[in-house]
Amino acid sequence: MSTLDFTVTGMTCQHCVASVTEEVSEVPGVSAVDVDLASGALRVTGEGVDGDQVRAAVAEAGYSASAA
């Protein structure tokens, strides 16, 4: 297992957190997603997870992510 950390911008509520969590959870290899609304921190745990796919999933949810 490995972890990838990102900073997500644009989230303002728990619905935002749920949207990001849902989209990122669908990325191949992801086993856990932890999103912190206050800091914008996103931690993705899994095996063989592609950071570009995680950023694309966050964009699909309507937000942007950069490496933390």
Image: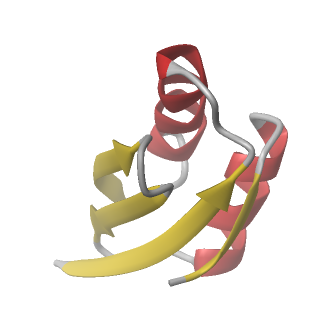
In percent of width and height, residue 19 lies at 59, 25
Which is more toward the observer, 35 or 29?
35
Q: How many labels does the image show?
A: 0
Residue depicted at 50% across the width and 84% down the height: 68
Which is more toward the observer, 58 or 31?
58
12 left or right, relative to 59: left
Residue depicted at 65% across the width and 38% down the height: 11
In percent of width and height, residue 52 lies at 71, 76
Residue 48 seen by the camera: no
Residue 47 seen by the camera: yes
Q: In which quarter of the image is residue 16?
A: top right
Q: Residue furthest top?
A: 15
In percent of width and height, residue 34 lies at 30, 48
39 left or right, relative to 13: left
Which is more toward the observer, 8 or 53?
8
Q: Colour scheme used in the picture?
A: secondary structure
Up/down of 12 relative to 13, above or below = below
Q: Which residue lies furthest to the front in this view?
A: 38
Which is more toward the observer, 25 or 28?
25
Up/down of 50 relative to 41, above or below = below
Up/down of 46 relative to 51, above or below = above
Q: Quadrant of residue 62?
A: top right
Residue depicted at 69% across the width and 49% down the height: 58
Up/down of 20 relative to 50, above or below = above
| Image quadrant occupied by the N terminus | bottom left
